[in-house]
Image: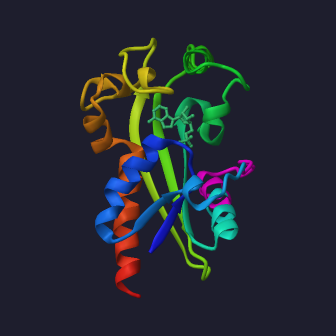
Amino acid sequence: MKLVVASRNEHKLAEIRTILTHLGVEVCSEEEVGVTLEVEETGTTFEENSMLKAKAVMEATGLAAMADDSGLCVDCLNGAPGVYTARYGGPGLSDAQRYRLLLENMRGQTPRTAKFVTVITCCFPNGDVIVARGECPGTITYAPIGKGGFGYDPVFFVPHLKKTFAQLTPEEKNAISHRGRALRDFAEKLEAYLKDR
Ligand code: IMP
């Protein structure tokens, strides 16, 4: 089976390929199947946004398509930035400007507990849908710590490892991250789905 990944991120594509190839799934990029869609993320949940992207690519290609949507939900901000994580503070900000804005908006607020969430939706041309989810709980630091990773990694602290995401190796992060968990959940669900066919 061919499965198109609705993402232009080469790193994500490689990660998904590694996990799904052993299921006999041929993982393709949008480019490889000749589409490049700009889908507006107008949903108010991770489920809605990942569905919007996966459905658009499935309809454009006639092939099974999967998309993910992720974000950071902070308890003392009532779950913000949530689906707006990538756009927090408006367009044109750097990763550092966005996480500094988050620290500023959390000043004096408790608790500092938070979670990263990833939802993966896969749409099939026959109307079937698989939804997988991964979460990683943590807390938000008072200042950035660590040099690795991307996005909000330097301010996302994992209590049981006593490190931020930015201090973990890619392997360590993948073992516990929202994206790693969602991908493994998706691989399990896809394997079960393909077995039943
Ligand atoms: P996306 O849906 O995977 O593009 O994620 C949306 C936004 O959430 C990204 O632009 C990042 O700012 C943030 N984000 C998602 N996953 C991570 C992560 O593992 N570390 C840090 N930031 C992340």
Quarter of the image where the N terminus is located: bottom left
Quarter of the image where the C terminus is located: bottom left
In this rendering, position of residue 53 left or right of residue 161: right
Point out residue 14 in the picture as x, y percentages from the top left corner: 39, 48
Q: Is residue 160 visible?
A: yes
Residue, x 36% and y 42% (percent of image)?
Answer: 177
User: Could you say which quadrant of the image residue 25 lies in?
Assistant: bottom left
Q: Is residue 22 above or below residue 173?
A: below
Point out residue 159 in the picture as x, y percentages from the top left corner: 30, 29
- Residue stretch rendered in magenta on the structure: 39-52
Residue, x 58% and y 72% (percent of image)?
Answer: 63
Point out residue 91 in the picture as x, y percentages from the top left corner: 73, 26
Q: Is residue 196 above or below residue 80?
A: below
Name the residue at the bottom extreme: 197
User: Is 46 part of what is drawn in magenta?
Assistant: yes
Q: Is residue 158 above or below residue 92?
A: below
Q: Is residue 61 above or below residue 169?
A: below
Please give the count of numbered marks on the rendered protein.
0
Residue 93 or residue 98, whichever sits in front: 93
User: Is 149 part of what is drawn in magenta?
Assistant: no
Residue, x 66% and y 28% (percent of image)?
Answer: 88
User: Could you say which quadrant of the image residue 50 lies in?
Assistant: bottom right
Point out residue 191 in the picture as x, y percentages from the top left corner: 35, 73
